[in-house]
Image: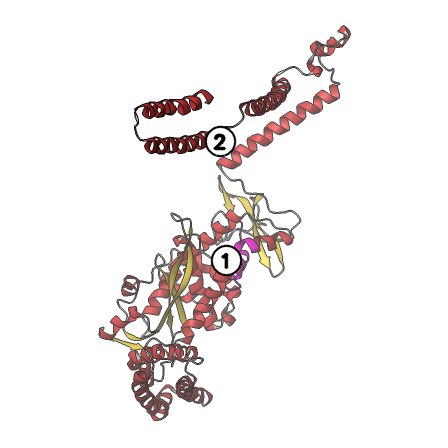
Amino acid sequence: MRISLIIAIFIPLKKIATMAENADDKDTFIQALLEERDRMFQEMQRLKGKLQGHTDVEQVKASYEKTIDTQQIKISKLEQQVAYLQRRLWGKSSEKFIKEDPLQRRLDFEGLELLPQEEELAHKAEQEIIAYKNIQVKIKDKPVRKPLPQDLPRVEEHIYPLNVDIHSQGITELEPEVTEVLEYEPGKCYVRKIIRHKYVVKVGADSQVVTAPLMPLPLAKSYAGATLLAEIMIDKYVNHLPFYRQIQMFKQIGVSIAPATVNGWFKGIADLLRPLYYRLRELVLESDYLQVDETTLPIVHEEKHKTVKGYIWMLRSVMRDLVFFHYDHGSRAQKVVIPLLKDFQGALQTDGYEVYKMYENKKGVLPLGCWAHVRRKFEEALKEDKSRAEYALGQIGLLYQVERRADQENLSQQARSDLRCRLSYPIMVAFEKWLVNEYPNVLPKSRMGRAIKYTYEIYHKLTRYHLDGRYRIDNNMAENSIRPLALGRKNYLFCGNDDAAEDAAVLYSLMGCCKAQEVNFRDWMVYVLNHIHEYDNDYSKDLAELLPNNLKLESL
């Protein structure tokens, strides 16, 4: 660097001297010398700046050597740790070295001496472990039913063969056949021990074995009695207790039931009652006045691995007090209601759902509206437009007051219709004109605007209830029938799949009929489970005989 600097200084000076020898003008020479000096000064400053930017080599070298030493120490420590761990994993520990005393080697070759008693206990333990393992394998292949707890009280029920004189000569009694059935009473379980006596009857030179027949149990090959099955179904579909909670409650009274067993019972009961469910559907659709509503039912979607919103439809025969729930893959679309009501003729009372508009043009169907839904719309608008909302609610209140008067006076259907024509109809005429006049004065998308529009669009259906004293002013009876389902989904949250939802519709329908007929749920269910098999092969009987409206409490 210094040599380059010297060369950069002396070479330009040589050139200036040459210029001085050849120059005639002294001022020109001085000017050139000054310019060269400025250039040399600038060059020196530039080179000096470069020298200042360079790091001291010795200092850098010392820093590198210090870093290398530190790394070498760290590498050495790590190598020692790796060697130690390798010895721990793969090397021989001190306990595995041969003993210093040669006599201690005897244990390595001759083993430990077992006493005869210890050897026998070890053999028995081995046999028991192998036997238990074999049992476990069998359980996986085919479930083995556990016996009912011995500490449960037993109630014996003896059944003797018909047309057999057990006291006559030539009769030999054999070991009876015993069937145990788990039954339930409020707060406790007990075992109904059915003892079927068996005899050998001699008829001349021949002998015949005669056994008392066993009354068909609700579910074949199941130890669950009618009272137990009824309790489980009612607790879920009336009292809204999920199965897993019921299982915990049974454990508290000394009965352990597997969840898979309870689910199997539920499926079996739904299948057993399904023919009665279909007969109920026929009777409901034969009615000439139906209330229809739908509500949500969360369903587990197996492909999406999450719950999706499904819908279940409810049909209520108002005059017969029959309730029917219909589930069709959770759909709320028009494709569900069309086949469901394709043969229906009569009055059809619904809310303002778009699907029901098509029945305005169907021959033989008279659509009716629901004033309760209209009242809710105006209640939602109270905070936004108090004066108009209060007026509308006041007019609707007058209509309901007429209905209360008819109920208090216990009017006949014709008298109720006459009262509506005289008092309710003039109010509805004035209210319709108020709707037409007020709608231009409100914002269409406001709550009041939406309430007026909703009411006016279905007003022709809302006012038809005055035509017949049987018709209701609203659809509240249908909503009351749906309320148990709404409470149930808050407790057990969802149905596992579409099949489970269809089975739930069966139970909800029959329990809804019990509620509408004010029939005791438990008594009805026990009676039906004990007698429904009587209809299996006797086609002269009508399953409708088992519906709650035909089986009143006093006949159960």
Give residue 501's position: percent from left, percent from top. Answer: 41, 57
Relative horizontal placement of residue 183, taking residue 287 as reference (left or right) = right
Asked whether residue 416 appears in the rendered view, the answer is yes
Q: Nearer the viewer, mark 1 or mark 2?
A: 2
Q: Residue at x 32, y 70 (%)?
A: 353
Colour option used:
secondary structure
Query: Mark 1: which amino acid?
Result: Tyr
- What label does residue 447 carry, if any? none
Q: Residue furthest top?
A: 102
Label 1 residue SS: helix
Within 10 Å of disc 1 (Cα), the crowding (few <14, some 14-19, many 20+) is some
- What label does residue 53 carry, if any? 2
Give residue 116's position: percent from left, percent from top. Answer: 74, 19
Relative to the observer, which residue lies in front, 16 or 369? 16
Q: Magenta stretch?
A: 222-245
Relative horizontal placement of residue 443, taking residue 261 as reference (left or right) = left
Q: Is residue 240 magenta?
A: yes
Give residue 112's position: percent from left, percent from top. Answer: 73, 15
